[in-house]
Image (tube, helix red, strand yellow):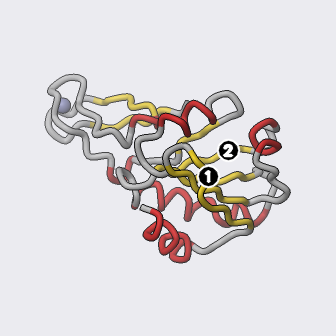
Amino acid sequence: MNTIVVTCNNCGTKNRIPADKQHLGPKCGSCKTSINMGQAAVPVELNDSTFTPFIKQAAKPVMVDFFSPTCGPCRMMSPAIDNLARRYVGRVIIAKLDTSSNGGIPAQFQIRGVPTLIFFRNGQKVDQITGALEEEALARKLNQFA
Ligand SMILES: [Zn+2]
């Protein structure tokens, strides 16, 4: 699981926050002040072994970007995915899974092309989009979903 380093606004302590905990109102390890994730939020990087437990335990709706680093449209959409992770932190969990290094979960969801976005609520798949979308189109989708 990827980790984010966030400096506490109150005491200046650098906190290491696992990406899967950034939605849970993290507090500073030193002064216990709530940490404002804001611009520090990033997509949660999932793989074949972390995917299922993460989706099952997610406290918020999750959008997973199934991508491949060699796919042009995926690379084009990647900055939008990063922005949405910041815009929707605390509302929707933005996650991604690299299909070039993970085969099991993409096979389970019958992913035939990338990018594919799958939306989960309460551990259940509720929607799926194949093909790249612009950030605002994705934001409209997330607004319906959040
Ligand atoms: Zn602090």
| Disc 2 residue type (three-letter) | Leu
* Mark 1 nearby-residue class (10 Å; few <14, some 14–19, many ≥20): some
Residue under numbered circle 1? 125
Residue 87 x/y as whole percent: 40, 61
Judged left or right of residue 124, residue 33 is left
Q: Are marks 1 and 2 in contact (CB under 8 Å)?
A: no
Residue at x 58% of width, y 48% of height: 124
x 57%, y 30%: residue: 53
Ligand 1 positioned in quadrant: top left
Q: Residues within 10 Å of mark 2 (few under 14, many from 20)?
A: many
- Number of numbered markers: 2
User: Residue at 33% across / 38% down in the picture?
Assistant: 24
Residue wearing tag 2 = 97
Q: Amino acid at mark 1?
A: Lys
Badge 1 or badge 2: first in the primary sequence: 2
SS category of the residue bearing label 1: strand
Up the image or down, 4 lies above or below 136; here it is: above
The answer as to whether callout 2 falls within 8 Å of ligand 1 is: no
Instruction: State the image coordinates of residue 104 (x, y, percent, origin top left).
Output: 79, 36
Would you say 50 lies left or right of 83 here? right
Q: Quadrant of the N terminus?
A: top right
**Can you say whether 95 is above or below 26 in the image?**
below
Which x, y percent locates residue 54?
A: 54, 35
- 1 or 2: mark nearer the eye: 1
In this orientation, which residue lies closer to the viewer: 127 or 39?
Answer: 127
